[in-house]
Image (cartoon, helix red, strand yellow):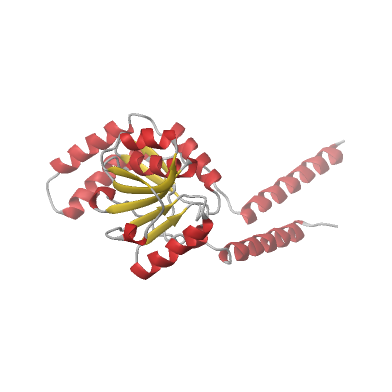
Amino acid sequence: MWTIQNLLEKMNSFQSEKSEAVVGKSTNELFPVFLKLQNFHTLLVGAGNVGLEKLTALVGNSPHANISVVATQVSAEFSTLASKHQNVVVNKRPFQETDLDGVSLIVLASDNTKLHHYIYELAKERGILLNVADTPDLCDIYLGSIVKKGNLKIAISTNGKSPTLAKRVKEVLNDALPAEIDETLDNLNAFRNSIKGDFSDKVRRLNQVTAGLVDKPRTLTISLTSFWLMIATTIVLILVIISLILWKF
């Protein structure tokens, strides 16, 4: 027969096993960083559907990025997008090793796996950062899903495990963040510039002003042990009341 003590011991054992599993689980060790693509040269290899997706991400976040494109076939949609950005140069020809001269970032988006591995080796020799579509093992960087609301930009990473989940998280954040968030950023920036004092004073004042953005209603929280003790106490009280009623009658 189960007793309150048995239940408490079982639940505590379950919690310990769960905690050990969490401790041993791998984590995302990627370092998030935002790049000024207009300050260096990017090479994009491939101009089909995947190449279009990569170019859309690049110029969508950095409209003035310096991008050279190399591809034997260029889709009409790709050409249309590239033509809207004067710093995007499309070369309709096979890849050449000299295409890597002066390049700081390479994005591979063709359907030629052998070519990708070849360029990967060249990039390693030259110390050039590399992103390869649908091949996490060859990537130095991932192009994650991005949430943009004016000057606010949030990058989402699943450590290369599920771009689909990253996309869904992006949709949730896009719906959750109000369009007026950019106006809030402008107001906070103006307020920060108006604050007098040293850095610590500014941080303290800004923390005070923005505290309301993250304040949550206080909720009652109790430990598992306390919960079961409450249940046990309630049961005892009920039994006492029943006994008194039976004794009276």
- For residue 40, say whether it is visible: yes
Q: On screen, 168 above or below 199? A: above
Pick whichever, 224 or 136, lies toward us: 136
Going by the picture, which residue comes out furthest to the front?
93
Comparing 7 with 212, the one in front is 212
Quadrant assignment for the N terminus: bottom right
Q: Is residue 178 above or below residue 68?
A: above
Q: Is residue 157 left or right of residue 20?
A: left
Q: Residue at x 42, y 50 (%)?
A: 143
Please state the horizontal and vertical placement of residue 195, each as a whole percent of the image. Answer: 15, 44
x then y, percent, for residue 35: 30, 52
Residue 199 or 189: which is nearer the viewer?
189
Residue at screen point 27% across, 43% down: 208
Measured as percent of width and height from the top left, residue 52 is found at 43, 40
The residue lying furthest to the left in this view is 196
| Left or right of residue 233: residue 147 | left
Task: Using the image as rendered, state which of residue 244 and residue 193 is in the foreground.
Answer: 193
Residue furthest to the bottom? 125
Counting the numbered discs, the total is 0
Q: Indicate the quadrant where residue 119 lies.
A: bottom left
* Residue at the spot 34% in from the left edge and 38% down from the top edge: 82
Residue 16 in percent (x, y) is at 64, 64
Give the left or right position of residue 11, taking residue 87 as reference. right
Can the viewer see residue 28? no
Please give the name of the residue rendered at 55% of the width and 63% of the height, measured from the top-left corner.
Answer: 26
Q: Quadrant of the C terminus?
A: top right
